[in-house]
Image (cartoon, helix red, strand yellow):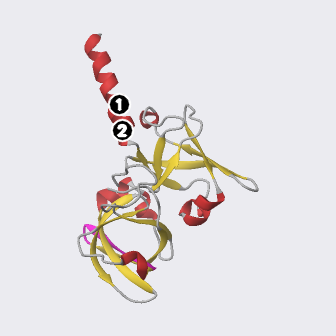
Amino acid sequence: MFTGIVQTKAVVNTITDQGQFRRLELRVASKHLKNIETGASIAVNGCCLTVVSFTASEPEALVCFDIIDETLRLTNLGALKQGSNVNFERSLSFGSELGGHIVSGHIHTTATLAQRVDSENNCRMFLSVEPKWLEYILAKGFVAIDGASLTVGEVEESGFWLHLIPETLALTILGEALEGQKINIEADQQTITIVETVKRVLAQKL
């Protein structure tokens, strides 16, 4: 379980294909791996991955994950290259501040960054997404974008708008996002539950 508050940006150090999976090695400031253990969960671009090994060193450390073909196909992790930046968040621990919203790390779909409009103190992004997912994405509701907990702006027939402040752009990989790029989407699970419950109740009454 995660909060959607990205802790840092990590850098892809190496990518190694090993049969039915791909090994991803990230380079990250060592303070973000404090008390880490093999088997721990870390959200990489919002996708929950399991730590298979790590090397503690200063000032940077290395941490490795194995990613299966299905995950590579359904998320933007398959497009990563050596030197790519990724959003990095350790799993929620007891007593941690819940500054965003509850995020599972299970990516529902990918969206395409169809339009980016930058101004002096703001950035607007329009994400094009499959229509079937839009019923779970509501104006002023939560959505996890590459693992970052954000508030949905306006919702249209083909997608939705985000309004991003400079701090979000600086602390996450969204600042680097280009038009045409694939972005991981996790809809808010509470919204999904409510929508599906209402649909089921209405169907029973018809």
Q: Residue at x 27, y 69 (%)?
A: 40
Considering the numbered disc 1 on the image, is that residue within a helix, a strand or a loop?
helix
Q: Quadrant of residue 14?
A: bottom left
Q: Quadrant of residue 179?
A: bottom right
Residue 105 image position (x, y, % from top left): 35, 55
Determine contact: label 1, label 2, CB under 8 Å: yes
Residue flagged by tag 2: what amino acid is it? Gln
Residue 113 image position (x, y, % from top left): 57, 50
Label 2 belongs to which residue? 190
Residue flagged by tag 1: what amino acid is it? Ile
Q: Residue at x 37, y 61 (%)?
A: 96
Residue 182 image position (x, y, % from top left): 50, 54
Q: What span is colored magenta in the figure?
A: 19-28
Q: Nearer the viewer, residue 27 or 141?
A: 141
Numbered tag placed on residue 194 in the rendering: 1
Q: Is residue 123 above or below residue 172?
A: above
Please identify the residue farthest to the top as the structure is shown. 206
Please identify the residue farthest to the bottom as the structure is shown. 58
| Quadrant placement of the C terminus | top left
Q: CA distance from mark 1 to mark 2?
A: 6 Å
Q: Is residue 20 magenta?
A: yes
Q: Could you tell whether 180 is left or right of 76 in the image?
A: right
Q: Residue at x 41, y 75 (%)?
A: 32
| Quadrant placement of the N terminus | bottom left
Q: Is residue 13 magenta?
A: no
Q: Is residue 185 above or below residue 139?
A: below
Please identify the residue farthest to the front as the structure is shown. 95
Q: Residue at x 65, y 59 (%)?
A: 166
How would you rate the neighbour count of disc 1 (Cα within 10 Å): few for under 14, some for 14-19, many for 20 or more?
few
Asked if residue 194 can be seen in this view, the reply is yes
